[in-house]
Image (cartoon, rainbow, N blue to C red):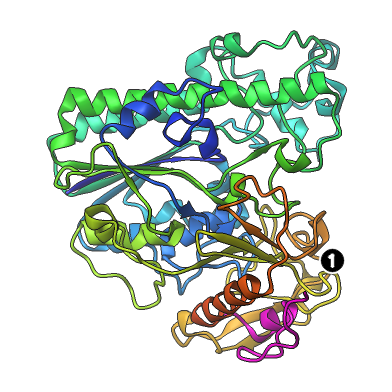
Amino acid sequence: MKVVFVLFDSLNRLHISPYGGSKVPTPNFARLQKRSATFDRHYVGSMPCMPARRDMHTGRLSFLHRSWGPLEPFDTSFAELLRNAGVYTHLVTDHYHYFEDGGSTYHNRYASYEFFRGHEKDPWHAVVEPDWAELEPRWHPKQFTRDRSSKYYPYIINRERIREESDFPAMKTFAAGVDFLERNASADNWLLQLETFSPHEPHHVPDRFKQAYRTGWNQGIRDWPPYDKVHETQEEADELRANYYASLAMCDELLGRVLDAFDAQDLWKDTVLIVSTDHGYLLGEHDFWAKNRMTLYEEIAHVPLMVAHPKLDVAGTRRNALTQVIDLAPTFLDLFGLPPCADMTGQSLLPVLAHDTPLREALLFGYFGGAINATDGRYTYHCYPVDADKVEINQYTLMPMHLNCMFSVEELKQTTLTREFSFSKGVPILKVPVTDRSPMYFNYGPGSLIEKETRLYDLETDPKQQRPLSDVAAETKIRDRMLDLMRLNEAPPEAFERVGARSAGQLVSQPAE
């Protein structure tokens, strides 16, 4: 068995042709659709980037217990399990979050890895005194800074090293991935994870991809949407969207290079190809940009998944089963004949591929400290904390690291030990109270939320989620499913209190009329 897993970041499924996208031509996604099963109800789990990857590795949700962080010592990673079973696993990526404190234990689970630098605020290019007189005129004021602590600073510096098309991290990543396929096509028993940070912001791509999306903008580089409501002028908003479209066009071409390699090496006969993303992205829908600050709308939470399998007749078909990111780990194991681990709550996708077998009635997704979200495929329920700024919340971890820093001494002073979760395999773990002194509090936690009102949507009558629904029976049903799934995932007691339940089994109040 051979497996190629192509992973994009921030790919909005509604902008690629297999899911109805037309603004950006995506002929290679369409080309893949003809050879694969396209999943129509595939969802995220934990959000955003690294929490999603922890779900992918472990086959279970992490957002109920932990914010952005590394794999834990008690976690079981599909990549390591495969490696230990004799499967060669290789990661090729330009996703620099793997090399920060909060992502530092993922890439080491593979037999080998290759990393290409330069995306976003990767601290890569060292220039102590930049030529500001030359640089400043190129940039829009919202993205220009001389402050080294700003997220824009390293991006400004890194762009100076990215001049030719071959310099772009995504280009390097896919070139290395195709090289792996060419060198190892005749070998067996391997998994390649080919992963790019694109089309994540900032949307910097070779100029030829921007030609079709020129807006006439002449006010400096403006390719990094804020995580906020839309406050920009129409011209500025158009430019921000156009740069995402250009990045998506590049991603389609890069996917095409993988498909070309499959054709050239005849990999379709013995290699599974899986293509997906960690989460979607807003481009002004619901009056928001990007992610994190708002409700997990369909554009963010409902993501693409396409799977081509040499032994199953799936070409050009659709799948309607409700699936999510935690199903990837058990699927990778199943493809190589290995059973899922006992602490995995995800399920193999192979029965879905073969017969569209239902896996579940509902699923959970969310950000640590934010709303707990549930869907059964018909309704989406977004249950915000009763009082997000005051209710108790704790991090459960043995790896006290945030995105790019350690937990502070102040954060750790109130730490206690707990053994209350079976997934820690009997190991006592840290229980760290979260306060507004935590770096994650205003970045991905309760202090970052703009929308805080619990809401229910009916995707059948309101697929764009424009009209929150008042339906006591429907809300009660999906709320009960949410609580059952919280129990299944061993949500801590305070998580139930935060959504209006006294304990794992008793509600404080029923949904209001």
The range drawn in magenta is 491-513
Q: Let me know if residue 36 is in the magenta part.
A: no
Q: Position of residue 56 (x, y in %)?
A: 44, 57
**Quadrant location of the C terminus?**
bottom right
**Residue type, mark 1 in image:** Arg
- Is residue 233 in sight in this rendering? yes
Q: Main secondary structure of the magenta part?
A: loop
Q: In terms of depth relative to the viewer, which is nearer, 254 or 508?
A: 508
What residue sits right under mark 1 in the picture? 437
Q: Let me know if residue 504 is in the magenta part.
A: yes
Q: Position of residue 32 (x, y in %)?
A: 32, 31
- Count the marks: 1
**Residue visible at 56% across and 89% down in the picture:** 420
**Residue visible at 66% across and 91% down in the picture:** 506
Q: In terms of depth relative to the viewer, which is nearer, 495 or 89?
A: 495
Q: In terms of depth relative to the viewer, which is nearer, 91 or 43?
A: 43
Label 1 SS: loop
Asked if residue 291 lies left or right of residue 398, the reply is: right
Asked if residue 339 lies left or right of residue 420, the reply is: left
In the depicted structure, whether residue 489 falls above or below residue 503:
above
